[in-house]
Amino acid sequence: MEALKKSFTEHVKSLQIEIIEQMKKIDPSLKLNKDLWNRKDKNGDDGGGGITCALSGDIFENAGVNTSIVHGLMDPSFGKQILKESNSDGEQKEYRMWASGISLILHPRNPRVPTVHANFRMIQVNDKFWFGGGADLTPYYPYEEDFRHFHEIWKKACGDDYPKMKEVCDNYFVNKHRNNEMRGIGGIFFDHLNSGDTKADFEQVVYLSNHFIESYFPIAEKRVIEKYTSEDEEFQLHRRGRYVEFNLLHDRGTTFGLKTNGRTDSILISLPARCKFSYAYKPPVGSIHEKMMENYFPKDW
């Protein structure tokens, strides 16, 4: 098990470097702020840390490609919540966690290029191990061929697991307070993956994570040269506002990071540099952006 934990950490660090290199190919102006951070656990002891890579350029307005390996004692109430234990179970019990993973969010400047998010992680709390992660796309322009490309790559990677992982994604990245409107057009998502064969689960998650580059960068490369209008940008900024709403109100990863004494700036790097809120916003009737709104609900891509 210790060998698998070490291998997973090495993998996500390698993938972090590879993804940033792909970004630089599209955006030579990209500036990288690489930040190594450390944390304390519940008792103030060494709790690990991570590598935050904050990026910005002409193409990618702001982005974060982060890895972390954290460990140590947890707050018992959150430990019980994570393991889904009742309040009466082991009131004096200690909860010790270990987690390693990669988390990324890319916010392109051009509204014709979609925002993308992905994360892949391995987690241990006491003697329980599991994996989680996925990838989802948030476009602002109705290029359905791009949506199909994204889903086809993940369908190929996931095989028979794709329908379930897609359904979980469709039901998770949702602003339930906005009439169940999705923040994007979905992708795949899975959590608490534990088949009983940790090595097989490890290999599956590494295999899936290696498909991220193929799923997204061909879309970005194709759309980045397109001209866009002020109306396109207006719509993008409003949809980014919906993105913020989800991340702050509903995202479990944000909650996990904050409740385990993660580094706040590294957690909230998922937020866009710019967004907009207007009361009761709706795109103009008959516009291409009104058409785009039809795609923020589950569809078979």
Image (cartoon, rainbow, N blue to C red):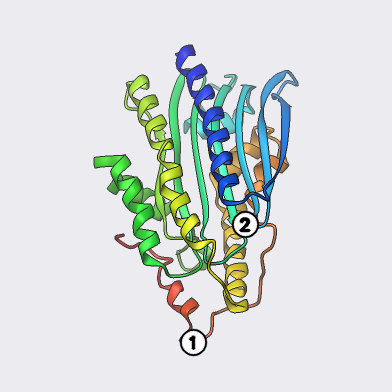
Task: Give the mark nearer the N terminus: 2 vs 1.
Answer: 2
Q: Which residue is mark 1?
A: 285
Q: Residue at x 40, y 51 (%)?
A: 187
Is any part of residue 292 visible from this angle? yes
Quickly name the residue at label 2: 59
Q: Residue furthest bottom?
A: 285
Residue 247 lies, in percent from the top left, at 59, 52
Q: Amino acid at mark 1?
A: Val
- Residue closest to the eye, 204 or 55: 55
Q: Dot 1: few (<14), some (14–19), or many (≥20) neighbours within 10 Å? A: few
Instruction: Where is residue 65? Give x, y as percent.
Output: 60, 40
Does the residue at mark 2 contact the one at mark 1 (Cβ under 8 Å)?
A: no
**121 versus 178 height, above or below:** above
x%, y% of residue 206?
Answer: 41, 30
Between 37 and 108, the one nearer to me in the picture? 108
* Nearer to us: label 2 or label 1: 2
Circle 2: element type: loop
